Image (cartoon, rainbow, N blue to C red):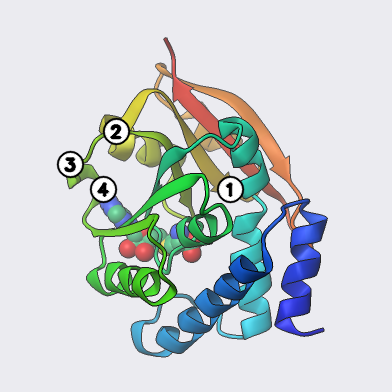
């Protein structure tokens, strides 16, 4: 199966409608990730087919739950520790109509890569910030995501100043992280641990949804 066919099948399995043009952009993003990975060391995964499954589809699996949460309404989202742009850039492409995405990474070459992807693919809803997230000064976000970034405790501690009133944290995790949940501060509430199934991937995945207690 070609990468294009595999992506289309995966999107269908996720019940995530993405136009043909956006699918081309997702593949173009993957190609840029592969190209610049050699120079910038953006990810340890190098094989294009594995990158599609382990990075792109793995990230996109969290998008339908996010769109259910936002009910498709226009939303500003910050993705922390995006690295090569995951899940932020995947979200920005696949849900371009409703998401404004700010990807943050403390490593300059990674932020530069993400900005370059935005420029090359014409992603007007994507912004890349080179900063430690705890030093970032921006208007707060209704949704803050992370994938393979830090413990839940560090995630919420480093970003709580950037969470809008009523906003949510969305942590993309592997196995249900019971120990990390137990270590959260008392004013942070886990309101849902949502199991995900990733097409073509036999591994446990979940989203830990959190918010500040009222
Ligand atoms: C393991 S990578 C994960 C990258 C990407 N989210 C993924 O799923 O492939 C973690 C990233 O977090 C970034 N990072 C670590 N501490 C940070 C901080 N305080 N602020 C912003 N980015 C940070 C690192 O530079 C690295 O790119």
Q: In the figure, is residue 180 to the left or right of 54? A: left
Residue at horizontal 40 percent and vertical 16 percent from the top: 187
Compare marks 1 and 4 and give the one earlier in the sequence.
4
Residue at horizontal 71 percent and vertical 81 percent from the top: 3
Decide if ligand 1 comes within 8 Å of the CB at mark 4: yes
Q: Secondary structure at mark 4?
A: helix
Q: Secondary structure at mark 3?
A: loop
The C terminus appears in which quarter of the rendering? top left
Q: In the figure, is residue 141 to the left or right of 151? A: left
Rounded to the nearest whole Å, what is the CA distance between mark 1 and mark 4?
A: 19 Å
Binning the other alpha carbons within 10 Å of mark 1 as few (below 14), some (14 to 19) or many (20 upward) gives many
Compare marks 2 and 1 and give the one earlier in the sequence.
2
Name the spot of residue 122 as percent of width and height, x first. Answer: 40, 69
Question: Which one is closest to the eye, mark 4 or mark 3?
Answer: 3
Residue matched to label 4: 133
Rounded to the nearest whole Å, what is the CA distance between mark 4 and mark 3?
A: 9 Å
Q: Is label 1 in contact with label 4 (beta carbons under 8 Å)?
A: no
Question: Which one is closest to the eye, mark 3 or mark 1?
Answer: 3
């Amino acid at each position: 199966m070609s990468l294009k066919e595999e992506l289309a099948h995966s999107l269908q399995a996720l019940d995530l409608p993405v136009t043909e043009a956006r699918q081309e952009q997702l593949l173009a993003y993957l190609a840029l990730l592969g190209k610049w990975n050699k120079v910038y060391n953006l990810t340890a995964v190098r094989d294009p087919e594995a990158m599609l499954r382990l990075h792109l589809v793995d990230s996109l699996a969290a998008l339908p739950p996010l769109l259910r949460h936002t009910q498709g309404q226009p939303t500003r989202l910050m993705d922390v520790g995006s690295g090569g742009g995951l899940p932020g850039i995947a979200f920005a492409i696949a849900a371009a109509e409703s998401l404004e995405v700010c990807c943050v990474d403390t490593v300059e070459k990674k932020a530069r890569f993400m900005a370059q992807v935005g420029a090359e693919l014409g992603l007007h809803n994507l912004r890349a910030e080179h900063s430690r997230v705890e030093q970032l000064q921006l208007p707060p976000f209704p949704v803050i995501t992370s994938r393979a970034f830090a413990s839940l405790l560090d995630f919420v501690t480093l970003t709580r100043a950037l969470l809008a009133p009523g906003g949510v944290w969305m942590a993309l995790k592997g196995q249900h992280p019971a120990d990390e949940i137990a270590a959260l501060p008392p004013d942070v509430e886990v309101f849902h641990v949502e199991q995900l199934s990733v097409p073509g991937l036999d591994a446990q995945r979940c989203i830990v949804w959190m918010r500040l207690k009222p």
